[in-house]
Amino acid sequence: MIRLQKYLAHAGIGSLRACERWIAEGKVTVNGEIVTEMGIQIDPEKDTICFKGKPVQGEEKKTTIMLNKPDGYVTTAKDQFGRPSVLDLVDIPGVRLYPVGRLDYQTTGLLILTNDGELTQSLTHPKHHFPKTYEALLQGEVKSQDLETLRKGVVLDDGYRTRPAGARLIGLNGHNSRVEITIYEGKNHQVRRMAKAIRHPVLRLKRVRVGDLTLGNLNEGTWRKLTPKEIQSLKAAAQTDSQKDRKGKRK
Ligand code: URA
C-alpha cells in the first residue's frame, strides 16, 4: 500500500506538492471515483488510478536478475552486425532490463541485468573497485612469475598499468592453463589484454563471481531473480567500498 500522492509523484506525474494540489482539485480518480481526501492509501496492484481521466502507469517494479551468458551473444540491445543480444534470452512482461557493465561477445558467465539505476551506478562507478572474478583458459603453461606479474599489475597495450589483481593457477588443461583472475576495475577487454601482456592469450573466458555473488550451477542461457538479500549485499559492498575510497583520499 502507498499513499496516493506518493504513488502519483513516483509515477512521474509531478512533484509531491503538485500531486497533492491536483488531488484537492478533484483531478484524480481511484477506481472511477474522484478522491479529494488527502493521504488515502492505494494498492497499485489492484486499484486503477487516473489523472485527468487517463490511467497512471506506476513506477516499474525494480527487478534484478543474473544470467549465465552463453558465448555468441552481445550485451548491448542492438548490434551493428545483427548478432543476438542477451536481452533475447530474458523476457519478463512489462519489465525492461539493462545489463550492468559488459561481457565480450565470446565471454560466458555471470551477467547482472537490472532496471535499478542506483544499483547499476553503484556497481559500475569507476571509484567503486568492485571485485569481478573470471576463470580463464590461457594458452601455454603459466608460470608463478606470470601470476605474480598479473597480481602486481601489468602494462596494457595502451600503456595503462592495471591495479593489483588476484591470480591463481587452478590447474593445467593439456598444454594450457586454467587461471582464476580477480580484477577490481573494468577497462575494455581487460582480462584478455592482461593475458596478452604476459604472452598467454585467453582461449576461453568465463565470469564466475561479482562481489559476493557467485554463478553457482545456473545453466548457460538461463537466468534467475536475485533475492532481496543478494541485492542488499551487492549494494552494501559497493557502499563500503566507496567509503573506503573516500577515507583513502583524505590521507
Ligand atoms: N575482460 C575481458 O577481457 N572480457 C570480458 O568480457 C570481461 C572482462
Image (spheres, rainbow, N blue to C red):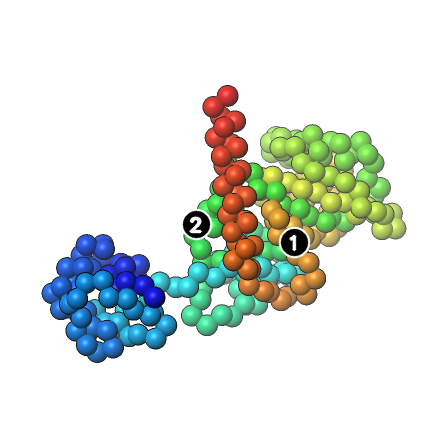
Quarter of the figure with the N terminus: bottom left
Give above or below for 36 relative to 242. Answer: below
Does 49 sit left or right of 225 as displayed? left
| Residue at image location 43% in from the left, 49% down from the top | 118
Does 24 sit left or right of 249 as displayed? left
Visible residue check, residue 2: yes
In primary-sequence order, the first of circles 1 and 2 is: 2
Q: Residue furthest bottom?
A: 32
User: Mark 1 sits on what residue?
Assistant: 214
Q: Quadrant of residue 3?
A: bottom left
Q: Quadrant of residue 105?
A: bottom right
| Residue at image location 23% in from the left, 54% down from the top | 15
* Nearest the eye: 114 or 202: 114
Q: Residue 118 shows which numbered tag?
A: 2
Q: Dot 1 surroundings within 10 Å: few (below 14), some, or many (20 or more)?
A: some
- Helix, strand, or loop for circle 2? helix
- Helix, strand, or loop for circle 1? strand
Which percent across, then down, holds residue 248?
Answer: 52, 27
* Nearest the eye: 200 or 232: 232
Q: Identify the amino acid type marked 2.
A: Glu
Does 200 sit left or right of 240 as displayed? right
Estimate the spatial distance between the alpha carbons at disc 1 and disc 2, rounded to whole Å.
21 Å
Give above or below for 160 relative to 69. Answer: above
Count of residue discs = 2
Q: Residue 137 shows which numbered tag?
A: none
| Residue at image location 13% in from the left, 64% down from the top | 24
Q: Quadrant of residue 6?
A: bottom left
